[in-house]
Amino acid sequence: MGTAPPARPADSELIRRLDAEWRVLAQSRWLRERLQSWASTDRRLDFADGEELVEAAQRRDVVKWSERDQVLTALLERVPREALAQRMALQVVLPGLKSLVNGIRGWDVEERAARVVATAIDVIAWCAAEPAGSPPSFRIYTNTRRRVLRSAIRDRSEPVMFVDDYGHIDEGAGDLGEPSEAQRLDQLVAWVQERGRLRPDSARLVVLTRAGGFSVDELADVEALDPQTLRRRRLRAEQRVRQGLSLAV
């Protein structure tokens, strides 16, 4: 009998190769010298090596997403002229990509990993060329997820779908990864923030889970938080929005 194919993203050949490549690259003299050069003009990239940079970019003990995303933002600014910056940005968001690979069914794990990673590389380049006010980690995650979902919807050879129910996104929808969709969500975040006098991260939590196609559990997994904590935060935010609308009448 043959060996069963790998089922987890960490077991895919592509993910193993990326992680192995990064272990070598992160501590290399070449990367350390590049970081020294970058840090001379951008203190956001002042790290001794790649491991230290990625650790800072993936921190969980922060109040705001934008605080953690300073490193990723700095990398994206360098992507148009530095291929290394794109590879490092990919490593920063790789944990979220692994959760995407794990959340799709229908393709085998190698196909899932290949599609998600290839899409993420394109999205990183797009985000670098089209700056926005939203946190880049969630922007990359959101657009990668949507583009893969659109690809799954178009591919009728297999019943591919995300494990959660997202059947409300129909075939006639436009390209969900294009700037107009990101702008629409950003505008909605701004409106919710203004009406409820909320912090940007609270407004984005409401929008992503109510209009952006994300579940609370999914965001909690990405942020390494208790889902109930996010649900309580969303409830308070929505109450403030309702109060704001009542006062405006």
Image (spheres, rainbow, N blue to C red):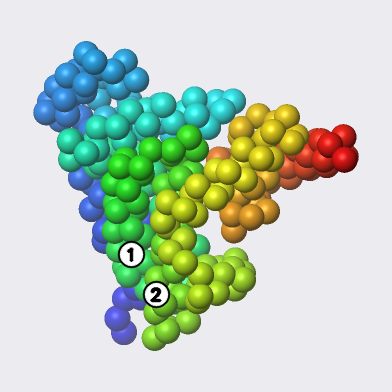
Q: Left or right: 74 with respect to 217?
A: left
- Quarter holding the C terminus is top right
Q: Give the residue at mark 2.
A: 107
Q: Is residue 212 at least partly visible in the picture?
A: yes
- Neighbours of disc 1 within 10 Å: few (<14), some (14-19), many (20+): some
Q: Give the residue at mark 1.
A: 115
> Residue 80: x, y in percent?
22, 39
Mark 2 vs 1: CB contact within 8 A: yes
The amino acid type of the residue labelled 2 equals Trp
Q: Front-most of 65 and 238?
A: 238
Residue 132 in which image quadrant = top left
Q: Left or right: 34 with respect to 210?
A: left
Residue at position x 50%, y 63% from top? 103
Q: Front-most of 56 and 73?
A: 73
First in residue order: circle 2 vs circle 1 = 2
Q: Front-most of 192 and 89?
A: 192
Vertical arrangement, residue 108 with respect to residue 123, above or below: below
> Residue 214: x, y in percent?
60, 55
Vertical arrangement, residue 11 with respect to residue 133, above or below: below
> Residue 87: x, y in percent?
24, 42
The amino acid type of the residue labelled 1 equals Arg
Residue at position x 35%, y 42% from top? 130
* Mark drawn on residue 49: none
Q: Secondary structure at mark 1?
A: helix
